[in-house]
Image: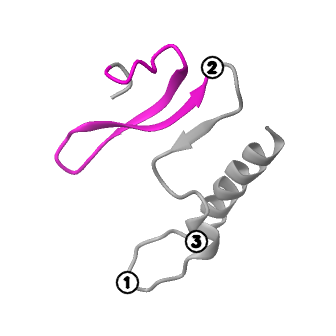
Amino acid sequence: DLVESNLTDAFKVISVNNDKNGLEFISSLEHVHYPFYGVQFHPEKNNYEWKPTQIIPHTKNAVIISQYFANYFVEE
């Protein structure tokens, strides 16, 4: 928890989501002064994981978004 960890002044919540039980969680955040980012998912999966047992989209848009994350993180 950002509040209990006293990190609310250091990090800005960018997005939240809900798990299958409806519990809200932080899915992405960024530091307010430094180029530090955290995501609660793997943006590279769309490009590089092709497991038939998992449902991972490999559409053009999914790959474009994955590449966007990579470019953004590198440019920061």
Judge whether residue 73 is colored magenta: no
Expressed as whole percent of the image width and height from the top left, the position of residue 14 reads 52, 29
Magenta span contains residue 23:
yes
Q: Is the N terminus in the top left, top right, bottom left or bottom right quadrant?
A: top left
Q: Nearer the viewer, mark 1 or mark 3?
A: 1
Q: Residues within 10 Å of mark 1 (few under 14, many from 20)?
A: few
Gap in angstroms between the C-alphas marked 2 and 1: 38 Å
Question: Outermost residue toward the front?
Answer: 5
Instruction: Spot the residue most to the top.
Output: 9
Q: Position of residue 62 (x, y in %)?
A: 60, 61
Cα distance in 3D space between marks 1 and 3: 14 Å
Instruction: Give residue 32's mark.
Output: 2
Q: Which percent across, then down, holds residue 29?
A: 52, 32
Residue at 71 percent of width and 32 percent of height: 35
Residue designated by label 1: 53
Q: Secondary structure at mark 2?
A: loop
The circle on residue 66 is: none
Q: Earlier in the sequence, mark 2 or mark 3?
A: 2
Residue at position x 58%, y 71% in the image? 58
Taking the view exactly as shown, the residue that stands out farthest to the bottom is 52
Q: Hey, what amino acid is under mark 2?
A: Val
* Residue 17 lies in quadrant: top left
Start-end of magenta stretch? 4-31
- Amino acid type, residue under disc 1 in the picture: Thr
Q: Nearer the viewer, mark 2 or mark 3?
A: 2
Residue reaching furthest to the left: 21
Look at the picture and state if 4 lies above or below 74. above
